């Protein structure tokens, strides 16, 4: 029996890797529905490959009803591969229905982790990580018998490549041009996450994601720079020994692992791995003065309430301004900091509606700052 699944955000980079795994495993999986946003041409190509799959565009008026229509279909799991805050509604709706959710959209948990995880617990939904670091951490925690209790875990480490600006500093870092920022040294990804990776905002988003996914306290989650991107996560036990999870930087590994949950993929998804293909492992601490967005995001996560929703919204809005050529790269972190320092009306941060009001207010501020400085 083939496992049926829905793919939200099918036209993106995670969508591409998922569809590649599906092409290799047509006997195991069946795509029954998918969403896309603006890329009609790519959506048409996917539809041609999977004519029985139902689909809709999230850019169309009334797409919320389409989401519910797809979630009413019969399926074994869903994949949320939408980029940014736009994914939170899909994730929350699926959590409320008790679905098995393969989550790439880390922003869902950054904006509303407490609400989404509470909904998942109440309805019996399961989250399976797709982000490579979280997929690796899941395997390490499972191997250590530490998925439920973290008593004998001293620290979980997420790795960051350091991105294309790792060797730049001062004005060269601040004024890095768009082409340089978008040239990631190890991963091929969508534009937004590639910019997030250059300033390490992405790693802050991932720390918050790990906190919600695994229930780890922030002081037990650290990030380190590992330029080769072979080691995705590490776990330090209470006796100081460290376990690492290693693979080539290819999203098809964690995606296939998630698709076969709770089992293991039967064969290699990516060919050609031997121990000699991993020649060098370097690790460096993160310079939080240079990578300010990382420090700001981490702090926002620890502050809880609405702060991580504001961090996420300000980051998304500032990245969009950078990609449109309206601000310099270094201004992304500055605008995030100004948005976090701003005073907001007292919206209800315990509801999704309230958090989305913080999201809108932070975006409006960033837009105003970007166009008046
Ligand atoms: N790429 C990676 O390797 C990677 C690794 C780990 C985690 N992630 C996470 O996975 C998610 C997707 O990343 P990605 O790199 O695949 O992004 P991407 O290439 O930019 O693709 C994003 C997908 O979201 C859709 N989308 C864009 N705006 C939308 C909106 N307002 N409402 C609904 N859908 C919208 C896009 O549709 P159209 O293209 O049709 O407009 C596309 O299908 C992000 O949360 C990212 O952090 C990505």
Image (spheres, rainbow, N blue to C red):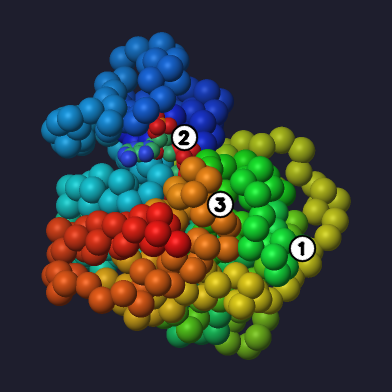
> Which percent across, then down, holds residue 360?
25, 57
Where in the image, quadrant-wise, is ligand 1 located? top left
| Residue in the foreground of this view, choosing between 268 and 136 | 136
CB of residue at label 1: within 8 Å of ligand 1?
no
| Dot 2: element | loop
CB of residue at label 3: within 8 Å of ligand 1?
no
Categorize mark 1 by other alpha carbons within 10 Å: few (<14), some (14-19), many (20+): few
> In this picture, is 124 found above or below 101?
below
| Residue ID for mark 3 | 195
Farthest residue to the bottom: give it.
239
Point out the tag, 3 or 2, that comes first from the N-terminus: 2
| Residue ID for mark 1 | 167
| Residue ID for mark 2 | 12
**Mark 3 or 2, closer to the camera:** 3
| Dot 1: element | loop
Q: Name the mark on residue 17.
A: none
Point out the tag, 1 or 3, that comes first from the N-terminus: 1
């Amino acid at each position: 029996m083939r496992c049926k699944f829905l793919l939200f955000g099918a036209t993106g980079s995670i969508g591409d890797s998922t569809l590649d795994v599906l092409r290799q495993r047509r006997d195991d999986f069946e795509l029954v529905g998918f969403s896309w946003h603006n890329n009609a041409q790519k959506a048409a190509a996917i539809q041609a490959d999977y004519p029985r799959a139902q689909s809709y565009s999230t850019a169309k008026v009334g797409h919320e009803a389409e989401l519910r229509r797809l979630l009413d279909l019969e399926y074994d799991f869903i994949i949320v591969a939408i980029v940014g805050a736009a994914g939170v509604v899909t994730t929350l709706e699926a959590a409320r229905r008790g679905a098995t959710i393969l989550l790439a959209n880390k922003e869902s948990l950054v904006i509303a982790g407490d609400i989404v995880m509470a909904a998942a617990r109440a309805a019996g939904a399961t989250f399976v990580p797709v982000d490579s670091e979280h997929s690796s951490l899941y395997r390490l925690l499972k191997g250590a018998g530490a998925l439920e209790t973290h008593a004998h875990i001293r620290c979980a480490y997420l790795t960051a490549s350091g991105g294309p600006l790792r060797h730049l500093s001062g004005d060269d870092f601040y004024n890095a041009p768009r082409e340089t920022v978008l040239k990631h040294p190890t991963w091929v990804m969508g534009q937004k996450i590639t910019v997030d990776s250059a300033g390490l905002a992405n790693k802050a988003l991932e720390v918050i994601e790990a906190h919600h996914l695994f229930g780890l306290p922030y002081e037990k989650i650290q990030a380190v720079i590992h330029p080769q991107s072979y080691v995705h996560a590490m776990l330090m036990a209470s006796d100081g020994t460290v376990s690492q999870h290693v693979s080539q930087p290819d999203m098809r590994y964690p995606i296939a692992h998630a698709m076969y949950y709770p089992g293991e993929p039967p064969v290699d998804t990516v060919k050609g791995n031997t121990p000699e293909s991993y020649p060098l492992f370097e690790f460096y601490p993160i310079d939080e003065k240079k990578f300010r967005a990382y420090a700001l995001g981490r702090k926002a996560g620890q502050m809880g309430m609405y702060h991580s929703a504001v961090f996420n919204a300000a980051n998304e809005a500032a990245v969009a301004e950078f990609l449109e050529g309206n601000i310099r790269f270094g201004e992304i972190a500055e605008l995030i900091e100004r948005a976090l320092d701003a005073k907001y009306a007292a919206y209800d941060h315990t509801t999704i509606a309230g958090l989305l009001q913080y999201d809108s207010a932070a975006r409006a501020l960033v837009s105003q700052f970007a166009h008046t400085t």
